[in-house]
Image: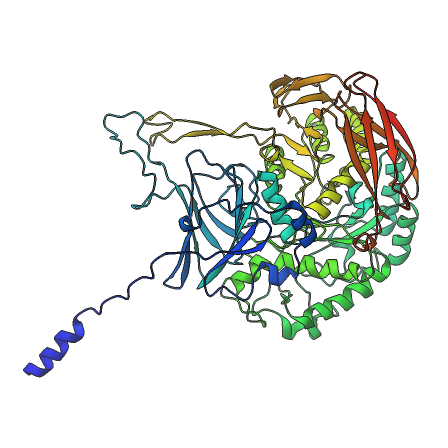
Amino acid sequence: MNRVTALVLFFLLIPAPLPAAAAARTLEWTRVLPGIWSAAVGRPDSVHFLQTAGVSPRREALEAMGDVPCPLEPALIRGEVREGKTLLHFPLEKGERIFGLGLHFKTVEQRGRILRLHMDHYGGTDNGRTHAPVPFYVSSRGYGIWINSARYIDIWVGTAVRKDSRHPPEVRDRNTDRQWTARPYSDNVEAVIAAEGAEVYLFGGPGLLDVVRRYNLFQGGGCLPPRWGLGFWHRVPTLYTADQVRGEVEEFARHGFPLSVIGLEPGWQSRSYPCTYEWDRGRFPDPAGLAADLKRRGIYLNLWLNPYISPQSELFQPIEPYTASHTVWAGLVPDYSRKEVQELLGRHFRKHHLDQGVSGYKMDENDGYDSWLWPDSAEFPSGISAEQMRTLYGVMMQKLATSLFRERNLRTYGLVRATNSGAASFPFVVYNDYYSHPDFITALVNSSFLGVLWTPEVRSSRTAEEWLRRMQSVCFSPLAMLNAWSDGTKPWSFPEVETQVREIAQLRLRLLPYLYNCFADYAFYGTPPVRAMNLDPGFAAAAEEVAGAVDSSANPYGEAIRREIKDQFLLGDSLLVAPLFAGQSQRKVILPKGKWYDFYTGRPAGDGEILTVAPGLDRIPVYVRDGGIIPMLEEGLRIPDGKVPLEIRHYGSKDAVYELYDDDGSSYDYEKGKFSRIRLAVTGGESGEKKGSVAVPKGSRLWSYSDFRWVFPSN
């Protein structure tokens, strides 16, 4: 080797200097609407939640909420793009609590946790893999952060400690200090997104409920289901025939159980897993006749399906060019973002479903399980990445199904296994196969932070006690359903509690006017119908965090022990529900500030205190806020069709006003102003001389009520 060659090799082997990383910079915020600001880092993806859902903010409602000052110091929020990834940094204050960041089943407060927000079937661990990995969090300080990126997002919520921390943790010596912990104090939230940019939104309050309302209104407001959707649902066994369905309906009537929706599981189709979306003519020779028979009895028909298309389907050949590179269960995976797919599926669903009288869908298997879903290497004709498609697929399916009913001016209500930001206005409720009753209630609490509806469906139980406790919970959820697809259970499967189950199912139906009002507030004002206790302005209780002493076996790293309020919730403004679980004979109930009354008796229950209650097996504890007005139907087995008498209950001594919402219960005409708000008012409560009044605005139409009767349970 000569000297020149040696020098060349020497310089070639010297490592090239690495490019300097882009420094994190303060974001530039733009006011979008009252109390809402946006900023961008790098080059955000063109495919995102708002673009996919195609929804528009409810501007008038947001304007009516009024403006608020920016709730965070902008200089403390930073972002950068480094090595093809977007990094975001948000501040945290001492004692600040964080809620949201996905549909969790075990935890409510998320500070101190590390998550990967990733669409998936929930696997029993709150790690971010869930049916609704919504990248939105709400702070106890009265603000919310939303990352509008349809990617998997890694997020550290008060766990990472930066050298430039404004509030660095105290240095402790493990050898001598029993307060040493492996998780020192952190004052930041950090997120990493595998994309070269992201859009971020900041929502102001001032209260937590205001933050959630602004977020919901920004993505179109909540859904308003048809009135029938809030009745009692029953899903029949998979291979039932049309005659067996009719027999099931007759049996419900004989037992005196209310019924509004019959759900058909996979066997209604000629093929499922993958699906044809076409009727099995052996089991269902006349689908239109069945739907018409049910409709005459006030019962609506809902169909199960999954997204994967069978080679035996009429759709297979025409839709094949617009499907993914991979199959699921040997079925095609349609690219729902393609117009051709929307048109082909739309024609097929109209022909085989809507034209036959079907009223809605249960959309299954669009969430996850890596072992059978398409991999992240899959390709879709639209060019949308497999990661983004997985994140958005449930939203796309909801959008298409909703549009098919909307074009007929009919509202629908259904079930879905996957949802995300942008889908609040779509009339679908999340469900899954995970079956822990306490965890179901935790998920119900968490859903209220996310613009998501969740239902703790009932399937089976080991004992009559468990059966009744599950039925009591489900009748206070956004969708009340028994799912007998596998084992054929009925509401009366445990005869020893049949009477109590019937009573709670009938109570669900009686509460329909109140429930419908809750959903009207969701649609018009963004107020979630079910809400966490932390969203109530009078609820000051935080999750207790007790410093954990170092213990060589039980707690070797001295981590804090957390207790959260995750087993009770509010339904609307006035009702507090505190479920019991199998094996419990009593429980604690935490009441917000103000007087509360027992729903069943009207007797005073307490004021901002912790109760220990033992209601017996027959009842689920329910409390009413002082001044609460609860409109109720008379007992019956069907959703009324036409005007019926209304019982109006007022609890406590506080004067009150309640706007009772009414419309035709089935169409979208309410969006054109065809609705009424009836003013219900109570005066004289403090003196004990209560007087109730009903005022129907001049020129308003009533669709649902013909008479009003006041009841004062607490007198």
Q: Quadrant of residue 698?
A: top right
Q: Quadrant of residue 481?
A: top right
Residue 269 pos. (x, y %): 76, 58
Q: Quadrant of residue 55?
A: bottom right
Q: Is residue 484 visible?
A: no
Residue 496 pos. (x, y %): 78, 24
Along the horizontal axis of the image, is 233 left or right of 254?
A: left
Along the horizontal axis of the image, is 294 left or right of 140?
A: right
Residue 436 pos. (x, y %): 60, 35
Relative depth, front residue between 467 and 692: 692
Q: Residue furthest left?
A: 3
Q: Kindly identify the residue that appears in the image at 72 percent across and 49 percent down.
A: 223
- Asked if 182 appears above or below 261 in the picture, the reply is above
Q: Is residue 465 visible?
A: yes
Exactly how many numbered labels are in the figure? 0
The N terminus sits in image quarter? bottom left
Q: Kindly identify the residue that appears in the image at 47 percent across and 45 percent down.
A: 72
Residue 356 pos. (x, y %): 86, 60
